[in-house]
């Protein structure tokens, strides 16, 4: 690992694989992963909704684990694999979780949606048949200000069923 | 229009606008990138009230990448203070995007830093050194009225922004006939709308034309424009106002952001670079928008049977440090003067004050939520005092359906509905009698169960002539909205409205309306997203606020579509050589009912746009219609008693809550929550129910979780999402939602505005909590019932 000073700034090379594609850049050690995703990789689907790691709009998967990407430095994700909302659909075929969110109108403004989807994915990868309480627990770190959560819970339940019945 | 007569209205059509957010392709303000953009950040005040002695930007300026630091003092050289609604003395208030001379609330922007990137801007904002001389702060609205209270704005001469009296009906006579007079002090607390996307602006100054391109999340860009261009001393024609394709929620919280827009615009002109500002969550909570906190001194004249004969109210409203939409809120409550009840004799003395708290603005249910809550709390107090059932007291006082449309005491016209019918439906769905019995059994086991109701109205599509109560010379009244329908050269139907969208799904909704008129598949109607004053249609009042989009934009679009349909039929009649009466429109064709011959929209469009000599003689080429809709409220302007019809539709919602309070922690758990609502004609039930459940969540969150708390010095104790905690999925209860539909008698297409919801759960939950705590003798005269607060009350009672 080499570090160098650029205009008073210490930077470090970082390579992160996001949705299967490697993004390399010289970044400040304090650069947040969410800013790497949004500003370096230019993937704008991951959102920022707070400054205290409370709202979950920036949730992504890092090596398969759900992470609030405002709570991790880009340098910590060096060499890791990140999955964001843009990586959910394959060849324009929506992921069953995405389908279920659409079918149940589980969003209004859509700002929390990418984070919700990633938290839901993390849950369903571990627990293919979650109870309602387990779903609520899984999205307890994601704030939605529009829907009242009820359609989101319905959608995750339906997505679980879709996945179990082999849609994906 | 009833449900049977419609083909597309009322259908739960899957929402086309949901696709981009679920794939991460929806574009919001912070996703817009322009070359050469620089970033703005604020240095904010840690004091609620202090003189600014000195601002030293030298350390910030020394940081590489920093372009400029600007203070309020310097801003004064470039900007006019923002326009005020009130006349002097309150109209003397000077408001700028940055504090001038002194800070007036915790978190107020004191200086702005612009740098090449966001990290540098935020670092540099912390390096700006500000020397303050702290001043005593006034945080309580009743303290603000005291003789020796510190003045928030010296130029007003007091802390009173506005004071008015409504003396409606025969109040003294009502009190003479009363069996009992009930007196109560009721407090409504301060919270914030906190849309998940904070405020944001990207301002671009174009030197070649000396004009501005403003990308922002403002809910009413054209209605906010006079404030912005007034401050910048630049004519409105020099501004192109845009919203990005997606805006991440608003709930009223994206209206008073014109301060950021103005400052970013100025800085883009000074620096000749695009300037971007994205509010942080902490900034959003401290200064983004708060709702008005309000104190009610209520006296009610009641008969022994629970009938309310009259009311006297002294109301004190705290609008915070600046009047950025205020004092409009000091009159807007009068859209719901008697609430949902047939009380004709009401005297209100309303005083609005400034204090050293964050500025207020329209928060979902602006100014009416407070008033609705007061009525719902006093209805329960009446019931308790007279030993009556709170359900019976409400049924005794509802405006009866046979008197609809009903003229209220302040001349608002209630547009039909069946309030008692909806309430009875709620009693059944809630299983009221069953829960009363269970309550008794549980009490014996030491469990604290309570049942509460709340019957609220959401007034939609307001008449701005109400601000003439405050200032007769203020040049705004009525309301208007624009719509356009076009069949383009290729035969595609395109619809545009002047409203903005922050998650209300206007794209699908408006397509359904147009499809209804043209008898065509709504998925084939193109509705462009976002807002752009250069290509959209708009009226001066345009925007999404006051539950107005379906009512005003919907009606304007419906009328525009009908107008275009007439032209389509006239051209088709000419081309087919048949009478219009023999023609019908279906699936983008005009068909003769006699011969079966038909002509397609694309054939008609070709004639209308390009093969124009084939048009009927004298007909104007083109296939586009434009309509600006302005409703008639009948009582359009205020009279000497401040009476006018200041809103067009009244959706109403009945809430019933069953709660359990933990006797040790005093945490409140909702066991059952039922909602019965009447939104009038429904365009898309997915959207309507989404708004209704969303508004229910906001009410639950306000009652149990959200409260902006300040200490006695005016320091905000809840400055971020760790301390200010909106309801999450685990706390949100199941909600059973039922409809009880009647058509609006005021709106042309029968719809009612439903976006705000009237704050119903705040009343039903607090009423249920008091009911649950009856064995402990705890009384509730406030709107926020957190476990902490209830525990403190219980401790207070215990000490005695």
Image (tube, coloured by chain):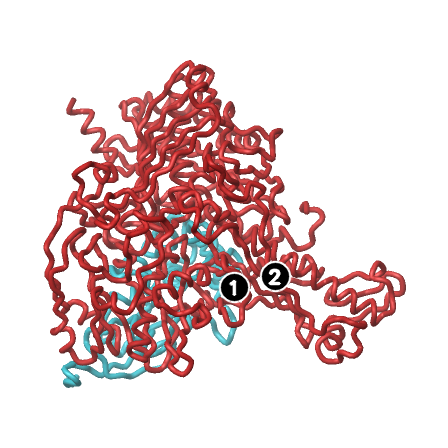
Chain colours: A cyan, B red
Q: Residues within 10 Å of mark 1 (few under 14, many from 20)?
A: many
- Residue occupying the point 67% across, 70% down: B487
Label 2 CA crowd tier, 10 Å (few <14, some 14–19, many 20+): many
Q: Closer to the camera: disc 1 or disc 2?
A: 2
- In the rendered image, the quadrant that contains the N terminus of chain A is bottom left
Q: Which mark is residue B720?
A: none
Q: Position of residue B382 (x, y in %)?
A: 40, 22
Circle 1 sits on which residue? B17
Seen from the viewer's position, the closer of residues B343 and B12 is: B343
Query: Residue at horizontal 72%, vertical 80%?
Result: B610
The picture places residue B762, in percent across and down from the top left corner, at 38, 38
**Does any portion of residue B15 appear in the rendered image?**
yes
Q: Is residue B377 above or below residue B5?
A: above
* Pointer 1 and pointer 2 on the same chain: yes
On screen, residue B5 versus residue B734, left or right, reads right
At mark 1, the secondary structure is helix
Between residue B615 and residue B3, name the one nearer to us: B615
Q: CA distance from mark 1 to mark 2?
A: 12 Å
State the residue lying farthest toward the right: B595
Residue at mark 2:
B511
Residue B772 percent coordinates (x, y): 34, 27
Q: In the shown orientation, is residue A35 left or right of residue A121?
A: left
Using the rendered view, name the quadrant where residue B579 is placed. Answer: bottom right
Q: Earlier in the sequence, mark 1 or mark 2?
A: 1
Query: Visible in this render: residue A134?
Result: no
Residue at x 41% of width, y 39% of height: B761
């Amino acid at each position: 690992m080499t570090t160098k000073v650029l205009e008073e700034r210490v930077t470090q090379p970082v390579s992160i694989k996001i949705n299967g594609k490697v993004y390399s850049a010289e970044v400040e050690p304090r650069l947040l992963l969410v800013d790497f995703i949004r500003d370096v990789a230019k993937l704008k689907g991951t959102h920022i909704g707070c400054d205290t790691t409370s709202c979950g709009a920036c949730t992504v998967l890092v090596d398969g684990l759900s992470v609030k990407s405002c709570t991790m430095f880009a340098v910590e994700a060096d060499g890791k694999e990140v999955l964001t909302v843009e990586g959910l659909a394959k060849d324009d075929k929506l992921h069953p979780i995405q389908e279920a969110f659409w079918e149940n109108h589980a969003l209004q403004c859509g700002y929390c949606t990418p984070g919700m989807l990633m938290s839901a994915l993390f849950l369903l990868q571990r627990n293919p048949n979650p109870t309602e309480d387990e779903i609520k627990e899984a999205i307890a770190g994601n704030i939605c200000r529009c829907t009242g959560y009820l359609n989101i819970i319905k959608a995750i339940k339906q997505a679980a069923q879709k996945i179990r019945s082999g849609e994906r | 229009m009833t449900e049977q007569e419609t083909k597309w209205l009322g259908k739960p059509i899957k929402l086309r606008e949901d696709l981009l957010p679920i794939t991460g392709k929806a574009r919001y303000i912070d996703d817009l990138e322009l070359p050469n953009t620089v970033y703005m950040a604020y240095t904010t005040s840690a004091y609620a009230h202090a003189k600014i002695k000195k601002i030293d930007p030298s350390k910030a300026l020394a940081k590489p990448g920093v372009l400029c630091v600007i203070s309020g003092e310097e801003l004064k050289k470039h900007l006019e203070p923002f326009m005020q609604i009130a006349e002097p003395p309150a109209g003397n208030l000077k408001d700028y995007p940055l504090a001038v001379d002194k800070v007036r609330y915790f978190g107020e922007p004191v200086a702005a830093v612009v740098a090449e990137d966001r990290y540098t801007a935020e670092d540099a904002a912390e390096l700006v050194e500000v020397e303050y001389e702290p001043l005593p702060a006034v945080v309580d609205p009743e303290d603000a009225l005291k003789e020796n209270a510190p003045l928030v704005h010296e130029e007003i001469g007091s802390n009173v922004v506005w004071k008015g009296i409504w003396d409606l009906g025969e109040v003294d006579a009502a009190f003479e006939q009363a069996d009992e007079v009930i007196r109560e002090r009721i407090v409504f607390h301060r919270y914030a709308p906190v849309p998940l996307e904070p405020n944001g602006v990207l301002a671009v100054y174009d030197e070649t034309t000396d004009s501005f391109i403003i990308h922002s999340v403002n809910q009413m860009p054209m209605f906010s424009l006079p404030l912005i261009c007034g401050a910048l001393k630049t004519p409105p024609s020099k501004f192109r106002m845009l919203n990005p394709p997606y805006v991440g929620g608003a709930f009223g919280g994206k209206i008073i952001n014109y301060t950021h827009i103005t400052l970013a615009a100025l800085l883009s002109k000074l620096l000749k670079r695009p300037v971007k500002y994205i509010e942080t969550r902490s900034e959003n909570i401290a200064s983004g928008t708060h709702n008005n906190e309000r104190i009610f001194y209520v006296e009610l004249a009641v008969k022994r049977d629970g009938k309310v004969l009259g009311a006297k109210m002294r109301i004190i409203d705290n609008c915070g440090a600046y009047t950025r939409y205020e004092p409009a809120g000091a009159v807007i409550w009068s859209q719901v003067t008697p609430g949902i009840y047939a009380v004709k004799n009401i005297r209100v003395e309303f005083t609005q004050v400034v204090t050293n708290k964050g500025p207020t603005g329209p928060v979902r249910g602006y100014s009416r939520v407070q008033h609705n809550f007061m009525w719902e709390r006093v209805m329960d107090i009446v019931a308790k005092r007279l030993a009556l059932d709170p359900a019976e007291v409400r049924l005794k006082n509802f405006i009866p359906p046979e008197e609809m449309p009903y003229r209220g005491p302040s001349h608002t016209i209630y547009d039909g509905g069946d309030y008692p019918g909806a309430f009875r439906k709620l009693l059944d769905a809630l299983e009221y009698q069953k829960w009363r019995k269970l309550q008794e059994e549980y009490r014996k086991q030491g469990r604290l169960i309570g049942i509460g109701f709340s019957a609220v109205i959401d007034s939609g599509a307001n008449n701005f002539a109400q601000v003439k109560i405050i200032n007769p010379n203020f040049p705004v009244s009525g309301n208007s909205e624009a719509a356009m329908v076009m069949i383009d050269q290729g035969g595609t139907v395109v619809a545009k409205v002047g409203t903005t969208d922050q998650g209300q799904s206007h794209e699908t909704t408006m397509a359904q309306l147009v499809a209804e008129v043209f008898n065509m598949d709504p998925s084939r109607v193109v509705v462009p997203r976002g807002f752009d004053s250069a290509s959209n249609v708009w009226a001066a009042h345009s925007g999404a606020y006051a539950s107005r989009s379906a009512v005003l934009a919907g009606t304007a679009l419906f009328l525009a579509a009908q107008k275009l349909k007439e032209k389509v039929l006239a051209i088709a009649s000419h081309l087919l050589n048949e009478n219009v009466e023999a023609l019908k429109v279906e699936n983008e064709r005009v068909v003769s009912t006699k011969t079966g011959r038909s002509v397609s929209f694309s054939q008609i469009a070709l004639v209308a746009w390009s093969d124009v000599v084939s048009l009927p003689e004298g007909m104007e080429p083109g296939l586009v219609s434009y309509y600006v809709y302005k409703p008639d409220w009948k009582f359009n302007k205020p009279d000497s008693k401040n009476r006018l019809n200041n809103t067009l539709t009244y959706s109403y919602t009945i809430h019933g809550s069953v709660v359990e309070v933990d006797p040790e922690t005093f945490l409140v758990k909702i066991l059952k929550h039922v909602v019965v609502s009447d939104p009038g004609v429904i365009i898309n039930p997915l959207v309507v129910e989404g708004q209704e459940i969303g508004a229910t969540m906001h009410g639950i969150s306000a009652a149990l979780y959200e409260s902006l708390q300040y200490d006695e010095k005016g320091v905000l104790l809840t400055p971020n999402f760790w301390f200010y905690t909106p309801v999450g999925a685990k706390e949100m209860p199941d909600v059973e939602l039922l409809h009880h539909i009647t058509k609006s008698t005021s709106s042309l297409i029968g719809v009612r505005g439903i976006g705000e919801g009237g704050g119903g759960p705040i009343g039903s939950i607090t009423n249920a909590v008091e009911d649950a705590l009856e064995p402990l003798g705890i009384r509730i005269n406030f709107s926020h019932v957190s476990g902490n607060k209830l525990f403190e009350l219980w401790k207070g009672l215990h000490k005695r």
